Amino acid sequence: MLEKSISQAVEKGEMLPLMEEFYTIQGEGSHTGKAAYFIRVGGCDVGCHWCDVKESWDPEKHPPTAVDAIVANAAKYSKTIVVTGGEPLTWDMGGPLTTGLKSEGMQVHIETSGAYPLSGSWDWICLSPKKMKMPLPEVYEAAHELKVIIFNKHDFAFAKAEAEKVSSNCKLYLQPEWSVREKMIPLITEFVMDNPEWHVSLQTHKYLNIP
Ligand code: SF4
């Protein structure tokens, strides 16, 4: 395909810069422990200094891949799909990707910072807000789960302020940033016991040594 037609296909959501796709166990948040097929899309300009997938940031490093092929591949593995990144909402998720996945009868989840307009049709939206590029109001309203990463003690106040913006039935999670987990887990434990509307989320896939 010519370069121009590839960039047009990416613009329409017919192709996406695919970083990796893999079948594993969801390690975080409300669906922890569930087998799921992950589709990791490249491209993110949010710039979290502790990001553990910095290789995802530059979309040019990931091959534009036909969405039909992504859907067909996913269908071989699981009925639960997690679209992650990078920041998936950088791209049009409302085109063939979520339409295709749902037409195969799949439950489609997204992990997003909410920094870009919400596109696509989702069964589960996990919003993980970042201070550097705050979520758009429409994503707060639609989120099923708010997952705040705790890197230092100031993040608890941020988490409380973010919880004010989501719907009343949105589930609330605090997750220690992996490199500081030993320091933050005692603080998170204490916070959740004092504020039981919150739950602890751990990156259990890392403890299990799986992707
Ligand atoms: Fe990394 Fe996610 Fe932050 Fe983007 S939003 S920099 S992918 S942690």
Image (spheres, rainbow, N blue to C red):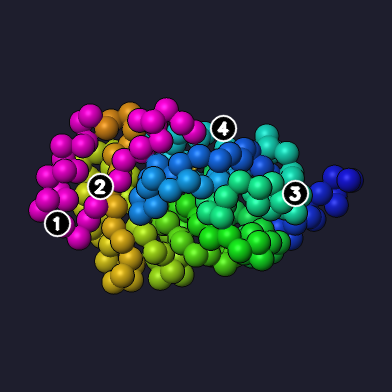
Say if the magenta span includes residue 56.
no
Name the residue located 46 percent from the left edge and 41 percent from the top edge: 25
Give residue 69's mark. Answer: 3
- 68 lies left or right of 197: right
Sequence order check, earlier mark of 4 and 2: 4
Between residue 205 and residue 116, name the one nearer to us.
205
Please state which amino acid type lies under the numbered disc 4: Glu
Q: Mark 2: few, some, or many residues within 10 Å (few <14, many ≥20)?
A: many
Real-space CA distance between mark 4 and mark 3, rounded to the nearest whole angstrom: 23 Å
Above or below, comparing residue 149 to residue 138 in the picture: above
For label 4, the residue is 55
Task: Please identify, in this view, whether the residue under mark 4 or under mark 3 is nearer the observer.
Answer: 3
Which residue is label 1 attached to?
195
> Which callout, 1 or 4, points to the residue nearer the camera?
1
Q: In this picture, is 82 found above or below 12? A: above
Q: Earlier in the sequence, mark 1 or mark 4?
A: 4
Q: CA distance from mark 3 to mark 1?
A: 45 Å
Dot 4 or dot 3: first in sequence order is 4
Mark 4 or 2: the one toward you? 2
Query: Disc 2 marks which amino acid?
Result: Val
Q: Which residue is mark 2?
A: 200
